[in-house]
Amino acid sequence: QVQLQESGPGLVKPSQTLSLTCTVSGGSINTDSYFWNWIRQPAGKGLEWIGRISTSGSTNYNPSLKSRVTISVDTSKNQFSLKLRSVTAADTAVYYCARAPTLLVEPTAIVGSFDVWGQGTMVTVSS
Amino acid sequence: QSVLTQPPSVSGAPGQRVTISCTGSSSNLGAGYDVHWYQQLPGTAPKLLIYGNTHRPSGVPDRFSGSKSGTSASLAITGLQAEDEADYYCQSYDSSPYVFGTGTKVTVL
């Protein structure tokens, strides 16, 4: 079955750029059946959707983060990536990558959910 | 900036039934979008528990059930077990396009 694994630095300095990669294994990322997402969770707090990408390169971002976020995909490596610019302590969180089925997936009731998640990676913003 | 509101905590004794509410608005649940539920055990990633309002993925026990009506949804756990102690989140579609609930901690007494 498909598995997702986040990777990247665990410590980023304020004002710098946070960069993470999600590697997809057990299946191809190059399919119209899924969107590929980033979600984060500050310690002791709830989940916040950051953004998503399709393998055609189409992106959508959370309006609250849109000015600082870029998500890209590399189908040759079966990976997608997150860049978050100008980070502050408020960006300290566990970052998850997750898969979201599109209307091409059955049953259609699962569309709009996040059916597979990575284990998460902790990123601390500190000097 | 969650737009889906959940109670911060609910608790119950083993074997009891607990319910978690998820209240949205006319731009998400009230617009007809489905609600999905996730279980997050301590120190782990969220896991899809209920999709499309009422459906359980393979492997999820049938003591978990979901419902939706208008701008609200509910997750019920019947026959509460110690292993159900976790955080639970609802999630739906909105203009963002995805939004999560504020989260509910379930404590087994």
Image (tube, grey):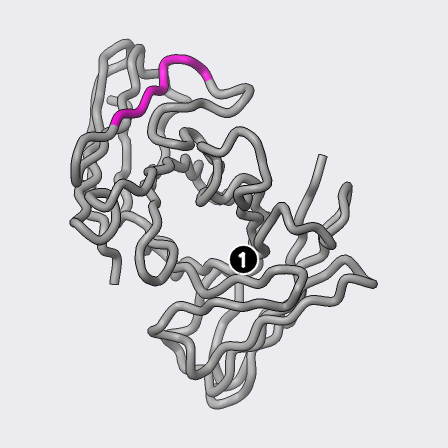
Farthest residue, direction right: A76
Q: Is residue A11 visible?
A: no
Quarter the N terminus of chain A occupies: top right
Give percent across and percent down for residue A20.
Answer: 62, 69
Q: Is residue A23 above or below residue B29?
A: below
**Stretch in magenta:** B61-67
Residue drawn at (74%, 54%) of the image: A30
Give percent across and percent down for residue A95.
Answer: 51, 60
Residue drawn at (20%, 31%) of the image: B10
Q: Which residue is mark 1?
A: A37
Residue drawn at (76%, 43%) of the image: A27
Q: Of A51 and B61, which appears nearest the observer?
A: A51
Q: Is residue A19 above or below residue B15?
A: below
Number of numbered discs visible in the structure rendering: 1
Element class at badge 1: strand
Q: Is residue B22 above or below residue A125?
A: above
Residue B62 magenta: yes
Give percent across and percent down for residue A97.
Answer: 57, 55
In the rendered structure, the residue with mark 1 lies on which chain?
A: A
Residue A72 magenta: no
Crowd rating for badge 1 (residues with CA inside 10 Å; few <14, some 14–19, many 20+): many
